[in-house]
Image: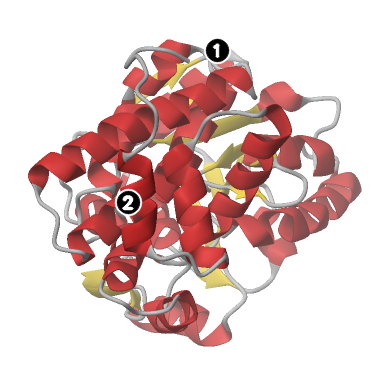
Amino acid sequence: MAKIAVLGNGSWGSVLGSMLADNGNDVVLYGNIDSVNQEINEHHTNAHYMKNWKLNPNVPATGNLENALDGAEIVLFVLPTKAVRIVAKKVRKILDKTGATPLLVTATKGIEPGSKKLISDILTEEVYPNNSERIVAISGPSHAENVAQKDLTAIACASTSEENAKRVQELFSNNYVRFYTNDDLVGVEVGGAVKNVIAIAAGILVGKGYGDDAKAALMTRGLAEITRLGVKYFGAKPMTFSGLSGIGDLIVTATSSNSRNWRAGKQIGEGKSLDYVLENMGQVVEGATTVKAVHELAEEKNIDMPISEAIYRVLYENADVDEEIKTMMGRNPKPEIQL
């Protein structure tokens, strides 16, 4: 049993917090929307993010970060990428006052535009500049809706410290969610982040009326792009992308209507604008932000990522989807297997 502070009480944060409480841990949720905190505390529900579902009644919610962190052995970040650095700075100030050194676990899947930093990099810079081994990333094929219904799920937990990865594995695993340790922290994070871009592309194909062959081709070649970026830019291990945070997460995110990124892509394929989709989604579409960082990374190192670059042009340069597909299918012939 451990005291765990979950930062972010959207769908995934609420489900993870409830699951961790079911596992016997002492859990508190932190969020900055008072009405959500009140609903969780009074009714044990979070209807905006998770309809027809109840949290473990022993999980309180608070808008006071200092109270949430009090005594926490593990701090779990389940925030949108754009909020991680802001909250991490506040966490550092509180930890400096208390002297506590909890494990930091990130369930956020994204790359920060501009800095092009992974979430573990942000947490290292802002909280543990001399203690990066105290950071663990969890990533894998896991929709909040499915975990809430206790669907069988497998997730990777990665750290440069085997001991800390095993600690998270022990506390987070139960009879319906199984965690596997992994020592390739950056690879696990890259897989979890960039698959959201490919999921948008998969949704676009469905919105345009393409079938199973097109989806399979997209996912396979998308995985090649994810692997290429992970290995060439971040120094990740190629085999990581054959695992849960690579092909596993790509399959579930690029094929399911539970995926916000897939749903966003489908609407774009049907002709809706990005602004309309983001305004009406009700939740963060991480792939729409991550694709900016991927575009910058690919340009910097001249990494061949035609699918990701096409999605960037569609989302931010008003490129025509049909023309992008035509251009991609007409590219010069090349071998299949190469980085």
Q: CA distance from mark 1 to mark 2?
A: 43 Å
Label drawn at residue 313: none
How many labels sit on residues? 2
In the picture, measured across the screen, residue 297 lies left or right of residue 129, that is left
* Spot occupied by residue 302 in the image (x, y as percentages of width and height): 65, 29
In the picture, measured across the screen, residue 267 lies left or right of residue 315, that is left
* Spot occupied by residue 324 in the image (x, y as percentages of width and height): 39, 54
* Label 2: few (<14), some (14–19) or many (≥20) C-alpha neighbours in 10 Å: few
In the rendered image, the residue lying farthest to the left is: 212
Residue 23, quarter of the rendered image: top left
Q: Residue at x 56, y 42 (%)?
A: 106
Q: Amino acid at mark 2?
A: Ile
**What residue is disc 2 on?**
325
In this rendering, is residue 159 above or below 259? Answer: above
In this rendering, is residue 31 above or below 206? Answer: below
* Spot occupied by residue 327 in the image (x, y as percentages of width and height): 38, 47
In this rendering, is residue 174 above or below 287? Answer: above
Residue 261, quarter of the rendered image: bottom left
One can see residue 56 in this view:
no
**What residue is disc 1 on?**
162
Residue contact between numbered discs 1 and 2, judged by CB atoms under 8 Å: no
Quadrant in which the N terminus appears? top left
Tell which circle, 1 or 2, labels the residue nearer the N-terminal end: 1
One can see residue 304 in this view:
yes
* Label 1: few (<14), some (14–19) or many (≥20) C-alpha neighbours in 10 Å: some
SS at mark 2?
helix
* Spot occupied by residue 316 in the image (x, y as percentages of width and height): 56, 65
Q: Amino acid at mark 1?
A: Glu
In the picture, measured across the screen, residue 144 lies left or right of residue 293, that is left
SS at mark 1?
helix
